[in-house]
Amino acid sequence: MEQKAKMWFAYFTSSSYQDEENFIPSERLGWSLQILSKANEICAEVETLLASKGFTPKGYFIEGLSKDNGWQTYSLKTWGVEVKKALKTMPILNNIIKRNSNIVSVSINVLNPDGEIKGHYGDSNTFHRSHFGVQIPEGLPNCGFKVNDESKAWELGKLLTFSDSNYHSAWNYSTEKRVIVVFDVIKSQYESRRRYICFRVRSFLILQLFFEKSHTIRKLPKWIHKIMGAFIASILFCIYPLQKITGTIKKHN
C-alpha cells in the first residue's frame, strides 16, 4: 500500500513539494494496463479526431509557460466533468474513462515544432500524470520530457507516467508536431477525497485565469486569493450536477 503523504496544492501550500520518484513504471498502475491493452485502438481514435473539423485545440491560458503559444490542448474530461461531445467519437477511450473514476482529467496535447513548455511545478501531489504517445516525431535530445534532472522520450502507444508535483518541462525541436493524450489519475490513497481534489484544482485553475486577465487581482494579498479560491470552489460544487449532465460550462485546462 502506498504511503499517504500530506496533500499538497500549488500556490497555497508550497511550490517545491516532492514525495516520490520522478517517473512511475506502468506495471505498478492497474489503470495504465487497461490503456496499454487498447493502445492501437486509442491511437486510431485520436488520429481520426485530429483529422476532423471538430478538433479545435486552444493555446494554454497561462501566458509565458510555453514558447510562442506552441502548446495547445483539447479537453476530453476536465477534473471530474466529461466533455461529452468530444468523447462521443471515441468509444474505446470513453469506455476506459468510465470504468476508472480515478481518471479525473483527460486531454489531447499538441506541442508544435520548435515548441517548449517551460519548467514548472504541477497542481498537486494527489495524482499521477501520464502521457500516452500518439504522434512522436523524434526522441532525445530533440524531443523529450524532463522531471527534475531526469529526461525521457515519449514513445508511440506507450505511457510516460510521472509525479506532477515535481519540477518538469518539455520540448519539441523537431519539424513535426508532437501529440499525446494526457491522463490525470488520482492516487489510490487519495481516492476517498477525489471530488474535493477536483474542486480544489479547478478553483485554482480559474483563479490563475483571473490572474492572467487582471494584474490587480494577481497583486492582491494571498489571504484574499484564498477567500476567492474557496468561493470559486463553492460555486463549482453547486454547478457540478449540471456540469455532469451537460459537460463543462467554462473551458479551462
Image (cartoon, rainbow, N blue to C red):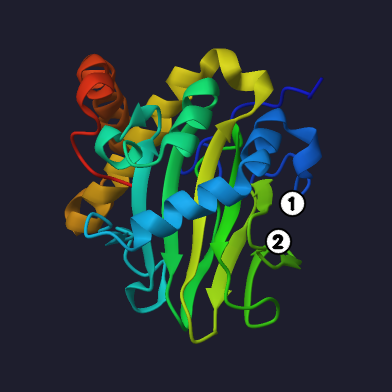
Reading the image, the residue beneath label 1 is: 22
Q: What is the three-letter code of the residue carrying label 2? A: Asn
Q: Residues within 10 Å of mark 2 (few under 14, many from 20)?
A: some
Quarter residue 195 falls in: top left
Residue 111 vertical position relative to residue 228 in the rendered view, above or below: below
Image mark for residue 148: 2
Q: Is residue 145 visible?
A: yes
Residue 62 vertical position relative to residue 204 in the rendered view, above or below: below
Rendered location of residue 14, percent (x, y): 56, 43
Q: Residue at x 24, y 44 (%)?
A: 251
SS for dot 1: loop
Q: What is the three-letter code of the residue carrying label 1? A: Asn
Q: Is residue 92 left or right of residue 247?
A: right
Q: Is residue 236 left or right of residue 32?
A: left
Alpha carbons under labels 1 and 2: distance apart: 7 Å
Q: Is residue 219 visible?
A: no
Quarter residue 87 falls in: top left
Question: Mark 1 and 2 residues: CB-CB less than 8 Å, in contact?
Answer: yes
Q: Is residue 221 left or right of residue 174?
A: left
| Numbered-mark total | 2
Residue that sits furthest to the bottom in the current view? 175
Name the residue nearer the viewer: 224 or 39. Answer: 39
Q: Residues within 10 Å of mark 1 (few under 14, many from 20)?
A: many
Name the residue nearer the viewer: 225 or 92. Answer: 92
